[in-house]
Amino acid sequence: MFTRLTLPLLFCLLCLNRPVWGQTPLSDDRIQRYALIVLELEPIRQAHLEEARRLLGTINTSGNLCGERNLPAPVQTVCNRYFEKSQRLVEQRGLTIQEFNLITTQAQQDPTLSKRIQDAMLRQRKGF
């Protein structure tokens, strides 16, 4: 079985305003990989979220719908498909789910890292 991705992360990169002590700085390459993954995952996340909302018959759900409990089986199937696609994409880009989630957590706690990721995402967008 796969480990779930920490999402939505695109909207929470500046959540906390304190440094993470004792963590090794991330290389520019890893940050570039992470930024590219985030940009590539967002349309996939949005498509699956829209499909799940259609199945539920509502648009008033959280962006983290797949993190909710007691979802109907068809919606859970959509969520599982999203998690599987996400895992494949993360691994194709050279990170593990655990590394991706760790970077997400670090970015939420470290404004300097968050800024580096945002800058990398801006550079990546120019290439899209």
Image (spheres, rainbow, N blue to C red):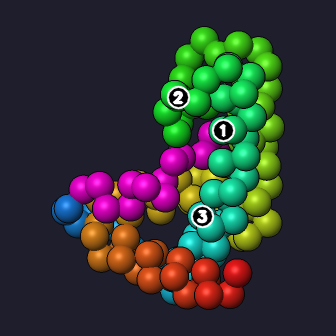
- Residue 69 placement (x, y as % from top left): 56, 17
Mark drawn on residue 49: 1
Check whether the beta carbons of the residues at disc 2 and disc 1 lie within 8 A of each other. yes
Please give the residue where the numbered disc 2 appears in the rendered image: 61
Name the residue at 41% across, 80% down: 116
Q: Give the vertical position of 58 relative to 62 (above or below).
A: above
The residue segment tinted magenta is 1-16
**Which three-letter amino acid code belongs to the residue tagged 3?**
Val
Q: Quadrant of the C terminus?
A: bottom right
**Which three-letter amino acid code belongs to the residue tagged 2?**
Thr
Q: Is residue 8 visible?
A: yes
- Position of 87 with respect to 106 (left or right) is right
**Which three-letter amino acid code belongs to the residue tagged 1?**
Leu
- Residue 16 placement (x, y as % from top left): 24, 56
Q: Is residue 2 visible?
A: no
Name the residue at 68% across, 87% down: 127
Q: Main secondary structure of the magenta part?
A: loop
- Position of 48 with respect to 105 (left or right) is right
Please give the residue where the numbered disc 3 appears in the rendered image: 38
Quick one: label 1, few (<14), some, or many (20+) residues within 10 Å? many
Magenta highlight on residue 7: yes
Quick one: label 2, few (<14), some, or many (20+) residues within 10 Å? few
